Image (cartoon, grey):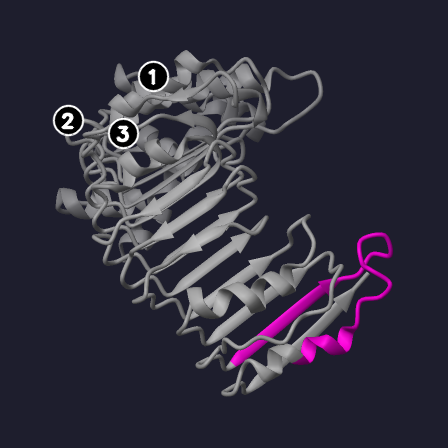
Amino acid sequence: MGMVSLNRLMFKHKERRRRRRVRNGLITSVSQENESLCQEIDQSQSGEMSRYSGPDLPEDIWCHIHSLLPLRDSARSACVSYTFLHSWRRYPKLTFTEEALGLKQMEGQKTGVDFTNRVDHILKNHSGTGVKILKLAVPLYRNVSSCHLTSWLQNAITPGIEEVNLTLHSEFMEEYNFPCSILHNGCGNSILYLRLTYCAFRPTSGSDCLRSLTKLDLYKVSITGDELGCLISNTFALEKLMLGQCNELICLKIPFWLERLSFVDLTWCRMLQVIESAAPNLSTFKLIGDPVQMSFGISSQVKNLNVGFSFKPNILSYAITKLPSVFPHLETLILSSMSEMIDTPMVADKFLHLKHLKIFLSILYDSWSPAYDFLSLVSFLDASPQLETFLLSTSG
């Protein structure tokens, strides 16, 4: 009923406003209305627009209804209703993308400037409290400065926030250092999901600021193994860790007290050489890149493993000789190889619990030895006495 009443309210107000514009000769296009979105909010602050207070409902219900609207509709409704104007100051889902802000990428437009002005206006009219989700995707324009980024993060990341998703582009890689201090003083302790791209992230020892974090996703982020260790050493609730092309990472150490950690995905971290994990309940592990030295302890519970797509040859030989002892409880194994120069050997160690095996081969003429014997793949069948399904796929 709340959404039906809201739609009826918005329609009536839109009709009244349209008739008023007709009388004053001020009919504007939809695009012009979008452009004036922030100005309308500013006008509403000074009472220059007539607004409807809405049905007499509890404040928390109005806030909930308001939170269900997309960002632009939510901003417009603040121009319609005193009640929505009040709840707009605590709007919980801040999504700053070109699409959400109504900015279309067109040649000759200063989209970066428009983006900056629009976000500035919205945060200016937001109290900074009540934010649950911040999604900030900066467009591919350099005129969104690092100072603006830091200011936006400071205004939006407040106690109670649960999701922070910062999507930058490659031009920020060398210049933007995510300000870890923003996460201090209780501002980071409520965050459940943190995703950062194309920036530097430099946590220090004693960074006890992400106690509730369950999912960490870093893509093309400059962070060392020691810095990552400082970060996750106190994230006792961490369940998923995803690192993509974090090329300062040489050694990854996962401590035993991360008891909830069940999923790790490492993709093309090209400098990575060593992985040590003592996480007792890690069950799914994905490594896309070059073979590395791995130690998961005798109590490893990894049951699902995905390894492959290295530019280095002989992933299959590496897998059959190294993995049985590292992951003794494997049940599902996915292997991908782009180059094999030697036959897959027979081995003494077995995948004693392996039930499902998938092997994907990308066969390029200049990366495979002409002498490679594909029948040598039978070694995996010999090493997997409990195997139930086997899939072999080739492409080239």
Within 10 angstroms of label 1, few (less than 14), some, or many (20 or more) residues?
few
Mark with earlier residue (3, 1): 1
Name the residue rendered at 50%, 21% in the picture.
Answer: 115
Q: Amino acid at mark 2?
A: Asn
Q: Of residues 371 and 258, which is closer to you in this image?
A: 371
Q: Nearer the viewer, residue 222 or 98?
A: 222
Q: Is residue 364 magenta?
A: yes
Q: Please, is residue 290 above or below residue 263 in the view?
A: above
Residue 178 lies, in percent from the top left, at: 37, 24
Q: Which amino acid type is shown beneath numbered disc 1?
A: Ser
Residue 22 visible to an observer of this rendering:
no
Residue 149: x and y, percent? 40, 19
Determine whether the residue tagged by mark 3 lies in a helix, strand or loop. Answer: loop
Left or right, 258 with reference to 25: left
Which residue type carries mark 3?
Answer: Ile
Q: What is the CA distance from the residue labelled 3 to the residue labelled 1?
A: 10 Å
Q: Marks 1 and 2: which is nearer the front?
A: 2
Q: CA distance from mark 3 to mark 2?
A: 11 Å
| Residue 298 included in the magenta stretch of the image | no
**Mark 3 lies on residue:** 157
Q: Could you tell which of marks 1 and 2 lies nearer the N-terminus?
A: 1
Q: Where does the magenta region start and end? A: 356-378
For the C terminus, give its image quadrant. bottom right
Closer to us: 144 or 124: 144
